[in-house]
Image (tube, rainbow, N blue to C red):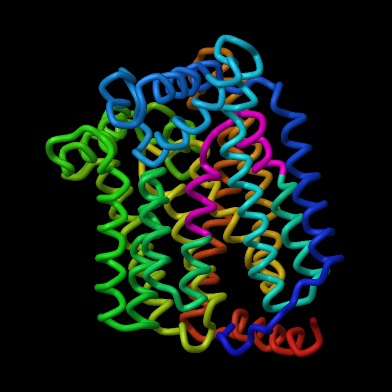
Amino acid sequence: MKRGNAINISVGKREVIALFALLAFSFLVKVLLFPLPGYSIDTNDFASWFHTAATYGVRVFYPNAGFCDYPPFNIFIFWVFGSLAARLQLFGTGLLNYVIKLPPNIFDTATAFLIFMFVRKRLNFKTSLVAASVYAFNPAVIFNTAVWGQYDSIYTSLLVLSLLLIFASKPEFSAVTFTIGLLTKPQSIALAPLIAFVIFSKFGWRRLLVSIVAAASTLFIIILPFQWSNPIIFLKNIYFGAYQGYPYTTMNAFNIWAFGGFWVSDTRSFLLVNAFEIGWVLFGALAVFALYMVHRRLKVSGELLVLFAAFVLFFGFFMLPTRIHERYIFPALSVLALTIPFLKKMRPIYAVLTFTCLINQAYILYYILDANTFISNADPVAFAVSLINSAVFVYVLMLIWGEMKGTPWLSLSRTELSTKTQQGG
């Protein structure tokens, strides 16, 4: 999709009502699931962090929190919603769980809205509403945000917006949004090479440098309210503290490392390298491969290629490095949802990864964490789901190779898109 393929739209009153009804209904479904318990330790952590932020404010949150491995932007969220809970006197009541689960579900609704707007600018209203629905009612997404009450949807929404801002020729705003995402969850780093590369490819060195300055300024502004003497050490302790504390091949993620067992040390040397190094080398190679694909084919396959590359990086980040949790595949689903109206090959991938993501999360939460046990190295469910994820990953690699060779699976979709755009409205 080139910029010229987008169509100017004026959303009518009926469309606004239909979209609002869809998003409101999906949000209501999630709220109705709020009473279902997530992981008690996670819930207690969030309750404590909300209370600490509301009591002490942002500046001295980390010294008073005791333990908190969440990056700085989350603390503002904890402060806002913690203050709301304090005002309503919800601490110590069951209703606090509703407040804890509100932020991720608000951002998740925002992601569905972004999907609608992206598709609506290119296709007709019905297709756009279906695309938003497919994400808004995705069972794996709902389980993550409304049942477990995790915060993966917040950085996911910010990264999706970052990509769409590049497509809207606003690279500086894209860099700002990406930085906020990075200050929400460290997994955002998976998208960093693609964001930088696409900004450079589309807008040149000057806009890239301005975008880097904008990102650095955003980082400084967000951490400025906190108490620190050295910003580098401050961020290093937050980002690497928990990561270094779990030196295992897989943290319950059903990926390639699951075949070798769970909670296996990733620091033991094998032929002068260890699993930790192998994992990051593999992801680095995948990132280089994906960026080379974008370099070779960006002018041919346009925005769809960028979205596909973003999915590859998110999926690869889940599959290849060590120390990965079961939820880290979450942002891959949002990017896939952006592509499925245009790319038929992405639809079965979306369905399969929705299934594996849901099973991975539910199995870990209800069978492992709630039972306060470790997953068996010979667990048949883990093996089967890991095998499915690995098969999908191999298929994705084949799609990358096909795009590199000029197989027109993306280009044909652009032709179809152009036709649909002329017919849509």
Q: Main secondary structure of the magenta part?
A: helix
Q: Is 164 positioned to the left or the right of 293 in the image?
A: right
Residue 35 location (% of width, % of height):
71, 21
Which part of the image, by quadrant, shows the C terminus?
bottom right
User: For residue 150: magenta?
Assistant: yes
Picture residue at 41% right of the left edge, 66% below the top: 173
Residue at far right of view? 14
Q: Looking at the rendering, which quadrant does residue 294 occupy? A: bottom left
Where 134 falls versus 196 (above or below)? Answer: above
Picture residue at 24% right of the left edge, 73% below the top: 209
Report whether residue 49 is seen. Answer: yes
Q: Is 187 positioned to the left or the right of 11 in the image?
A: left
Residue 70 location (% of width, % of height):
38, 34
Where 4 falls versus 91 (above or below)? Answer: below
Residue at far top of view? 92
Residue 248 location (% of width, % of height):
34, 31
Residue 138 location (% of width, % of height):
71, 47
Q: Is 365 positioned to the left or the right of 196 in the image?
A: right
User: For residue 250: magenta?
Assistant: no
Residue at far left of view? 229
Picture residue at 57% right of the left edge, 13% below the top: 371
Q: Is 34 positioned to the left or the right of 103 in the image?
A: right
Which part of the image, by quadrant, shows the N terminus?
bottom right
Q: Looking at the rendering, which quadrant does residue 57 occupy? A: top left
Report whether residue 247 is seen. Answer: no
Q: Which residues are magenta?
A: 139-160
Where 7 falls versus 313 (above or below)? Answer: below
